Amino acid sequence: MTTHALPPVVDAATWERQLEALRAREKAATRELDAIAAQRRRLPMVEMPDYTLEGEDGPVRLADVFEGKRQLIVYNHMWFAGKEWQCPGCTGFTAQFTRLEFLDNYDARFVIVTQGPIEEALAYKQRVGNRMAWYSTADSAFGADVGAPPDGGFAVNVFLRDGDTVFRTWHTDGRGTEQLSHTFALIDLLPYGRQEEWQDSPEGWPQSPTYSRWGTSKDIAAAYGSDSRGD
């Protein structure tokens, strides 16, 4: 017998009724997300200065980070000088994105920008097996101007390019980034969910301190990094 608490066992008809009640809320949430996306498409925008970042091949204007696309999503990766392993949340989150070519059909690109020096950032990218394009704003005010200052938090920003002029159209941070992740969506389907102390769960459900089940940056490197591939 299991020592974990279990959901109550009911007959199939009772289960179907309760599932249908939950599904009604899920569908309502989907329609609300559609409405939020519609409002997002109607947001105004703000013109950005002509920033210069550092890329793998040297200095690059923000407008050129688009690589000819009109739309750009930027994940601002946390960076702390002198640390061997950077933020595990950022490392794990961005490790999900291994196939981004589908964005080509939407005239868009998704990249990482960090405050770390580009040489260190690219070395970290290889160590943890990250597949995204990385840029550095170490010598630019770009990060600080879009909500990701040195030694600060992570953020997601979206930009639209009109010729050589770049506009900022959207920003989020904190749990606002969860909508971009498939990990939480999958975990939230499980009977025990994320198993974190802050969540509303039935009595006896397994719960742990927040973040304690998250993989570390070292775990990500072991699974996907250069050492794991024998490079």
Image (spheres, rainbow, N blue to C red):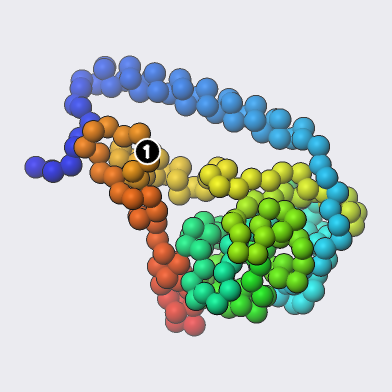
Q: Position of residue 57 (x, y in %)?
A: 75, 77
What residue sits 41% from the left and 64% below the top? Answer: 216
> Is residue 180 visible in the rendered structure shown here?
no
Q: Residue at x 70, y 75 (%)?
A: 56
In the image, residue 55 lies at what x, y percent? Answer: 73, 72
Q: Amino acid type of disc 1?
A: Gln
**Residue that label 1 marks:** 199
Q: Nearer the viewer, residue 14 or 42?
A: 42
Residue shown at 51%/56% (left/top)?
Answer: 93
The local crowd at label 1, few if under 14, some if 14 to 19, many if 20 or more residues have their Cα within 10 Å, is: few
State whether residue 226 appears in this view.
yes
Say if 119 sits above or below 207 in the image.
Answer: below
Q: Secondary structure at mark 1?
A: loop
Quadrant showing the N terminus: top left
The picture places residue 119, in percent across and down from the top left corner, at: 65, 79
The residue at the far bottom in this view is 231
* Relative side of 56 to 129, left or right: right
Residue at left 59%, top 56%? 153
Q: Position of residue 95 (x, y in %)?
A: 52, 61
On screen, residue 131 versus residue 208, left or right, reads right
In the rendered view, tell whether residue 200 sits above or below residue 83.
above
